Image (spheres, rainbow, N blue to C red):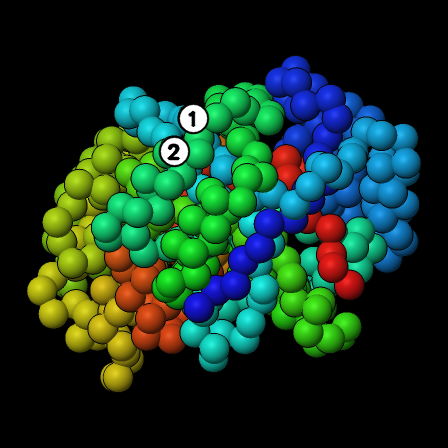
Amino acid sequence: MPEIRPFAAIRYRPGDPSFLAQVLAPPYDVISPAYARTLEARHESNVVRIVLNLAGDPDGYRRAGDTFRAWIERGVLAPDPEPSLYVLEQTFSVGGTRYRRRGLLARLRAEDYAAGSVLPHEHTRKAAREDRFLMLQALRANLSPIFTMVPDSAGDLRSALEDVARADAAAEYRDDTGVEHRLVRVAAEDPIARLTGLIARTSVFIADGHHRYATALRHRDVVGPEGAWTLGYFVPVEDPGLVVLPYHRVVVDGPSLADAEGRLARHSEIRVVEGLDALATAVQSSQAPHAFGLADRSGRGLLVEALPGGAGRLPAGTPPCLAALDTYFVHRHVLPDLLGVDDAKVRYVHSLDEARSSVAEADGPLALVLRATPVAHIIDVARAGESMPAKSTFFHPKLPSGLVIHPLVV
């Protein structure tokens, strides 16, 4: 079972909303180059300067580490007075619906996946692992947590988080996407024991942060068992605020929309839908075992729903948990077999707006619109020890970098 502990977090001082909005940032892997420049210009102490190697050269990691230590020396960042747990409450809207998600930030002992305490659902990439390891070595701290999901069918963890969240906030701010963040520090012995005990009773599932977890394991292997401590975030699986958005694709070198329609017609039910937003709504509402949308720059879209038996065209022996995924069906059958497209010709985009602008750049690209992956499917894949295709999930909202900083033990 996962082992977690309180710790004295390093946090920005002062912690008032106006300052935090100037210095905090999203996780490194969702910061575009243009947005990185915006954040860098926003404030001289914006965390983007130490969460990313902005220069893109080997010495950039050293400079990030030097900057981090200089901020501590100047008092821009300072540790809390005692070991604590931290409850983060995020309030946000999706599609006109208001949500609130509560989770716990704590020190987590990283263990090999074979131990069964923490279970993944996707592979990691070598370049990203190396980047995160070099940054960790330079900073000697975790600026972003590993986002995990905790089964909580009885609601005990949700109740404990709600109780703690009634206390005064240690920090509050609103980010650029409109998400409201409220942090409560927990230093009393009884609530710490209650929260750690509830999480330690079951395996947890990585939602986001597989590269950060791989980095924690590598650090442990380098320095020894005490180097296994990293920063974890724990949210109940059943929390209504645990929202997964779809991760869309752009096919940058493939068939035209008309050609794709002809290739897919024998295997699918196809309906024309005008407009990318309407297409996304139609895809998300589909009850077919596998469904996706295709659209070009004209705005003409196709809702594609696989005919019964479509999963039978996947490779023999495909585990049922993977056969149920739209992303697996698309990457293992539709793109290579029906459209003649390999993964090197596919780009991943976070939003319909990104897909729309990417398709508008030229005549060739097609937007490939997908449904959100249900949380239950993610857990099924993790429990089976399998891995989803890259970019199968987009958990929203993201956890801010720099709100709670975890110093390495070794």
Instruction: Using the image as rendered, state which of residue 361 and residue 280 is in the foreground.
Output: 280
Q: Which mark is residue 163?
A: 2
User: x, y (%) of residue 376?
Assistant: 26, 57
Looking at the rendered structure, the secondary structure element under dot 1 is: loop
Q: Which mark is residue 308?
A: none
Viewed as shown, does residue 343 lie left or right of 185? left
Q: How many tags in the picture?
A: 2
Q: Are marks 2 and 1 in contact (CB under 8 Å)?
A: yes
How far is the residue under mark 2 from the one under mark 1? 6 Å
Structural crowding at the residue carrying mark 2, measured as other residues with C-alpha within 10 Å and reported as few (<14), some (14–19) or many (≥20): few
Structural crowding at the residue carrying mark 1, measured as other residues with C-alpha within 10 Å and reported as few (<14), some (14–19) or many (≥20): few
Amino acid under label 2? Asp
User: x, y (%) of residue 216?
Assistant: 65, 64
Establish if 324 lies above or below 258.
Answer: below
Amino acid under label 1? Arg
- Give the residue at mark 1: 166
User: x, y (%) of residue 290?
Assistant: 20, 57
Establish if 92 lies above or below 374.
Answer: above
Q: Is residue 261 visible?
A: no
Viewed as shown, does residue 319 lie left or right of 390? left
Q: In percent of the image, x 58 and y 55: which residue is there?
A: 5
Instruction: Using the image as rendered, state which of residue 324 and residue 1 is in the foreground.
Output: 1
Q: In percent of the image, x 78 and y 55: which residue is there?
A: 140
Instruction: Using the image as rendered, state which of residue 12 and residue 345 is in the foreground.
Output: 12
In the picture, the quarter occupied by the N terminus is bottom left
- Residue 150 sits in quarter: bottom left
- Residue 200 sits in quarter: bottom left
Viewed as shown, does residue 216 lie left or right of 103? right
Q: In percent of the image, x 56 and y 49: which residue is there?
A: 106
Looking at the rendered structure, the secondary structure element under dot 2 is: helix
In the picture, the quarter occupied by the C terminus is bottom right
Instruction: Using the image as rendered, state which of residue 145 and residue 73 is in the foreground.
Output: 73
